[in-house]
Image (cartoon, rainbow, N blue to C red):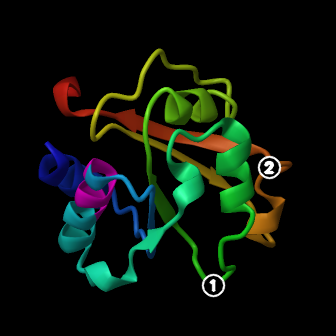
């Protein structure tokens, strides 16, 4: 399912330039599949231990430390934390992000350090069985 989802995201003209993952085996494997589809060397994967069984606070703390040279970052993590986190971002609420599901937002930024307090715009939610 991950290759299908990576292709769907790429077809939306989303230009991911950074891939960040929990160090868990399945999250890393999914991230590397996406990276292959996006033509990014898997050695460039950033592993953040705090994304394993992460709370929303962990996600915000990690995002606020992203390098400002990155315009679009894909994060690979786990439930229930990832679903709880995305439900803090916008008014668009979901029950569950399934395996390989993608929830995308944008925000006007000066810096990733502004992410927590910036207004986010919901872009899309897609998952393997959605079509």
Main SS of residues in magenta: helix
The disc at residue 39 is none
The answer to whether 96 appears left or right of 112 in the picture is left
Q: Quadrant of residue 101?
A: top left
Image label count: 2
Identify the element where label 1 is drawn.
loop
The answer to if 74 sits in the magenta stretch is no
Residue at figure coordinates x 25%, y 54% from the top left? 30
Query: What residue is disc 2 on?
Result: 116
Evaluate whether residue 63 shows in this view.
Answer: yes
Q: Which residue is mark 1?
A: 69
Specify the quadrant of the image occupied by residue 69.
bottom right
- What's the residue at 62%, 35% (across, down)? 85
Q: Is residue 69 above or below residue 27?
A: below
Q: Residues within 10 Å of mark 2 (few under 14, many from 20)?
A: some
Say whether residue 129 is left or right of residue 71. Answer: left
Residue 25 vs residue 116, the one in the foreground: 25
Question: The N terminus appears in which quarter of the rendering?
Answer: top left
What is the CA distance from the residue labelled 1 to the residue labelled 2? 18 Å
Q: Is residue 48 above or below residue 67?
A: above
Q: Is residue 9 above or below residue 64?
A: above
Q: Position of residue 37 (x, y in %)?
A: 19, 68
Q: Residues within 10 Å of mark 1 (few under 14, many from 20)?
A: few
- Residue shown at the point (38%, 82%) measured from the top left: 44
92 or 35, which lies in front? 35
**Residue 54's x, y, as percent?**
59, 41
Q: Quadrant of residue 16?
A: bottom left
The reply to whether residue 11 is in sight is no
Which residues lie in the magenta part?
26-31
């Amino acid at each position: 399912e991950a290759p299908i989802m990576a292709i769907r995201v790429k077809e939306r003209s989303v230009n991911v330039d950074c891939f960040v993952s929990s160090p868990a085996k399945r999250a890393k494997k999914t991230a590397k599949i996406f990276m292959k589809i996006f033509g990014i060397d898997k050695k460039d994967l950033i592993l953040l231990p705090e994304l394993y069984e992460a709370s929303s606070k962990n996600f915000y703390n990690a995002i606020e430390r992203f390098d400002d040279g990155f315009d679009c970052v894909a994060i690979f993590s786990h439930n229930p934390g990832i679903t709880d986190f995305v439900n803090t971002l916008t008014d668009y609420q979901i029950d569950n992000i399934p395996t390989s599901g993608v929830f995308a937002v944008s925000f006007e930024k000066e810096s990733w350090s502004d992410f927590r307090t910036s207004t986010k715009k919901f872009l899309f939610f897609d998952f393997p069985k959605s079509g």
